[in-house]
Amino acid sequence: MKRINQFALLFLVFGIEAYAQNNTITTVAPFLNIVPDARAAGMGDVGVASNADGNALFHNAAKMVFHKKEVTLAINYTPWLRNLTDDIYVGNISYQQRIDERSAFGGGIKYFNYGEVQINDGFNSGSTTASPYELAIDGAYSLKLNSNYSMAVALRFIRSDLTISGTNLNDNQPSNAFAVDVSGFYKSNEIPFEEFNGVIRGGFNISNVGPKVTVLSGEGFLPTSLKLGGGFDFIFDDYNQIGVSLELAKLLVPTVNGEDKNFLQGMFASFSDAPAGFSEELQEITLGFGAEYLYNNSFAFRAGYFKENENKGNRNFLTVGAGFKASSFNVDLSYLSSNSVVNNPLESTLRFSLSFDVGDIYVD
């Protein structure tokens, strides 16, 4: 349990992506963009164009139909602000299933637990305890349009319960919202080269598209995002493979003056409303790079890098990870080391993921 005043709670709610930098974009429910799984976290948070796995639902639901296992259940756990407290975390459970060679569906729950919060008003007039939380429930359908390309649509229900009885936050009711994702994924056939075979990958995801939401008496945009990525697999033989991926992401939220815009107007304005013009728009693009070495389709070693402009949040970190695959389950771990002067909530944090595969194996 931790003791915190109301102003600190507001920072916890709205400060997940923002660190008081110049023109940093803030959103409602930023937990939606926290990467839940250790595999992607070990590769610099990239996932929109990486090879399909049991966590495709979060990164790019179109990848689900390229996952070779018929049914996969994935469980992820991420401690948050572990250097300050031990009861804030992000938990995620997802399920996905291949229907046939051309289609798949999936669903999941993502839960952000703020822990047990003891609130005081700063005037020594008493305190109260609460357990605020936010969650998202997803459902998605993926369809192959041809043997190499698929698209998906996901629907998301979002609930934010930050009410605190006995304080001026008590008048706020839990907020509910709906959002959609639209995504696509491309994976080529193996291409023979002199020393290895190669596979080209590409993907996009427009996520969290939905109306503005009121939280703690303030109205804000959901963290609508555009992610574009590409990758290449170096297949040296039946035992050794290296995959590299590059990902660019941008919030489709107004930089300034979004009060008079709805969510669709905000999405289009996000490409041209930065006060410093196009150069500042480019600053709003984050870059992630990841690499994964896979041996005998059983052991994986990963590394990655993530970069955000210093004026837009200044997240800058290196990641490493590892994974073990058996016939029916996978275990993944990752670790983050920040290169920024700004503290990262995941600094020196070990993250865990488990997934379980059952049913037939699809050979695409």
Image (cartoon, grey):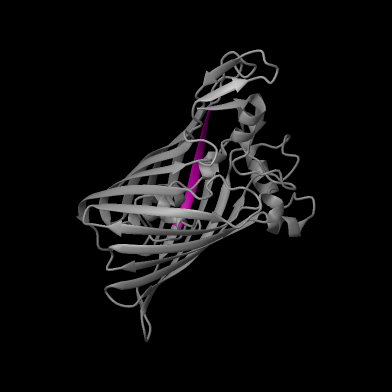
Q: How many marks?
A: 0
Left of 80 or right of it: where is 199? left
Left of 122 or right of it: where is 164? left
Majority SS type along the magenta span: strand
Whether 40 is among the magenta residues is: no
Percent across and percent down for residue 204 are 50, 56
Vertical placement of residue 114 versus 60, above or below:
above
Whether residue 99 is visible, yes or no, is no
Whether 179 is among the magenta residues is: yes
Point 59% across, 33% down: residue? 13
Whether residue 238 is visible, yes or no, is yes
Closer to the camera in the image, 106 or 101 = 106
Farthest right residue in view: 276
Percent across and percent down for residue 181 are 49, 45
Percent across and percent down for residue 129 are 53, 19
Q: Quadrant of residue 125?
A: top right
Percent across and percent down for residue 20 are 71, 43
Left of 63 or right of it: where is 245? right
Point 54% across, 25% down: residue? 117
Q: Quadrant of residue 340?
A: bottom right
Q: Quadrant of residue 120?
A: top right
Point 78% across, 55% down: residue? 277
Magenta-highlighted residues: 176-184
Q: Quadrant of the C terminus?
A: bottom left
Closer to the camera in the image, 21 or 220 = 21
